[in-house]
Amino acid sequence: MPSPREETVPELKRPVATLWGVGPERAELLKRLDIHTIEDLLLYRPRRYDDRRYFMRIADLQKGEPATARGTIVAMGLKRFRHGTKSVFEIVLDDGTARLHCRWWNLPYMQNYFSQGDEVFVFGKLLQTKPRTMDHPETEVIEGGEESFVHIARITPIYSLTEGLPQRWLRGLIWRALARFEGQLDDVDQPALGRGLQAASTTVARATMKRPEGRAPIHSREAGSLPSRANAVHMIHFPEELSDVEIARQRLALDEFIELQMQIRARRQRFEANARALPCGGDNHLIKPFLSKLGFKLTESQTQVLREIRADMRGAHPMRRLLQGDVGSGKTVVAACTALMAIESGHHVALMAPTEILADQHFANFKKWLEPLGIQVEIQTGSRKAERSESDAGGKRMIFVGTHALFSSGFDLPRPGLVIIDEQHKFGVAQRDQLVRKGDYPHVLVMTATPIPRTLGLTLYGDLDISVIEQMPGGRGRLNTFVRGSDKLPEVFKFIREKISAGRQAYVVYPRVDDAGDKELKAVTAEFENLKTVFATFKIGLLHGRLAGHEKEAVMAGFRANEIQVLLSTSLIEVGVDVPNATVMLVENAEQFGLAQLHQLRGRIGRGAHTSFCILVSNAKNPEARRRLRILEETADGFKIAEADLKLRGPGQMLGQEQSGLPKFRFGDLAEDLNLIRQAREWVKGERPRLAGGG
Ligand code: ADP
Ligand code: MG
């Protein structure tokens, strides 16, 4: 009996333990699968499907090919060996065409699940044919009775389980829950969603039909109809055709994306309702002289992006804009111009970088660029504190450059009109939000060189407008990338010595396992000693996360001044560092880095007029790892690389799950569902996106 209190809770939101047949013990097991409510149960996605309408004759099973068969147990037994420490349990199935041996090594308790005469489904790969044998196949004993039609003679869902939870029981439970509750599914959360979706669905279905490759082909249904949510949930568990599964998945993924976009939009609307913008459009009286003394002309892309930014800075709501541009595309100058707009309009600016090295570099650049214009530039990092007189007398407009220390550590930042965040992904979404609260609604420009695949951009940064610098500044030397085995290291070192003798500088990058770890520190230090011998006539610098701020600074300053010719570093230098004379980069154990990260790393070179060389050294025996690295030999397009990385490693790994702030999807697939994400976004906006994200 539901208690009176429960009656106010929608049935789908009630604990799964309120279902008939789910006792406290089973409820506990379901919890391990993250199934808490009835809705969780209905949305629990099968791991795969077994087509039990047809199965292979045992005689027809092919070695190495996964297949489903069924047969009767004609023999079974457990053998122990090595004084009872090892065992193998075996059943022999017969289906009238042949016999199949199924073995489980060191799982003696398997014998409790079978009896002689049982009829059994097996799914697995034939290991050998004499005798026909499968090791550790998936099995399910076929039982007659009421619910047998749930489990056999159909496309049957197979779920991930946890120990003690039988496949058959869970499937039966879901079947019964569907029968009772699936009608309520359309009404969950957003009644309006169901209606609106029909419009969105139409386009999605069309997009789906056109899909040229990839998932299983969609079998024809009337154009323009995705199933209802209830139907989709039913189909995801008990599809009539395997092709239904993808249709259902898309419908459910669309729901997830719409829900997320609604949240994003709600957040943005709350923000716009509460936040008024400071007029920061500027009047060009500083930008003009700045650009004329810069020494190069802005690219068309940079100019276009600045136009978008200026429109925001003049607008009614504070700017929330993401600036994407591949490494070396020239985001810093754009940041400087944006800062000048705010300063022209009489406001302070804060520029936040993810590392001290980068903050130092920005500080140096901004000082060089802006102090001649009478603008005061200050730095605030963990190790460097702004020396600022109590009242910045004279009303001089200032730029504060720093790390996150700018916004913590009790530093009394005068209210900025503009906050610029460089290399945004290093901060994560949570920190971004924190910043907005602190900053009293300044304009915010976030910049990232991580070429975020569009799917992720629209999801992660759905509440930001996006500008992209698509063009690289001209006058750059070529950047060549090579993948080499570590047996080639002597030649690689020789090559680097030649380049240094010709006046260039080199980075040697050592993988960061954990930049705070002792083991890794030892490894880097050993490598440092090694390099001292290899490059005996040159000066080597060492950079790692354990150095104090001023030590890092000293090393970087030495490298910038070419007093240090070879800089050995952990992936610390990944972001932003700009030393145009450095034209060689050697990355050791390259297979330990993600592709996007390697692309970032090599963005440190190829910044001057000289041809640059990135050598990725890998010991990986695994040909897959080599192939992955080859992508970097083939393309310099950061977006392509990011998409490849996303597909290879998934978004969590690519961005770091906890850092990324990515929501977890049951059905949505960020690497594949760009179309659905767009549909969701357009539908929620009720309009075409102003500036569709990505490149
Ligand atoms: P990133 O986008 O990776 O932050 P930077 O802003 O560090 O790139 O710029 C890389 C280099 O290109 C810098 O040395 C910068 O001065 C130079 N640069 C930027 N814009 C241009 C341009 N329009 N023409 C020539 N050089 C440029
Ligand atoms: Mg940069």
Image: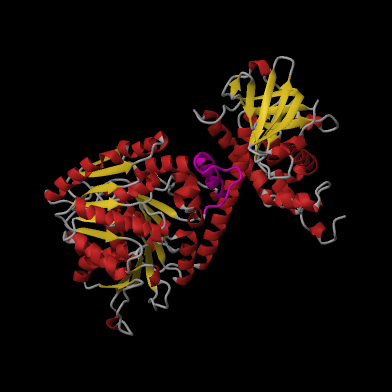
Is residue 221 in sight in this rendering?
no
Is 520 displayed left or right of 67 in the figure? Answer: left
Is residue 201 in sight in this rendering?
yes
Residue 681: in magenta span: yes
**Residue at image point 17% right, 60% down:** 292
Indicate whether 81 appears above or below 366.
above
Tell me the magenta residue range. Answer: 662-684
The picture places residue 607, in percent across and down from the top left corner, at 22, 50
Look at the image and tell me in which quarter the C terminus lies.
Answer: top left
Indicate whether 79 appears above or below 316.
above
Residue 131: in magenta span: no
Which of 395/96 is in front? Answer: 96
Q: Residue furthest bottom?
A: 390
**Residue at image point 70% right, 38% down:** 108
Which of 309/386 is in front? Answer: 386
Q: Quadrant of residue 143?
A: top right
Which of 102/168 is in front? Answer: 102
The picture places residue 339, in percent across and down from the top left corner, at 31, 65
- The quadrant of the picture showing ligand 1 is bottom left
Indicate whether 526 appears above or below 639.
below
The picture places residue 453, in percent across and down from the top left corner, at 43, 45
Query: What scheme was used to colour the molecule?
Result: secondary structure
Look at the image and tell me in which quarter the N terminus lies.
Answer: bottom right
**Residue at image point 53% right, 46% down:** 682
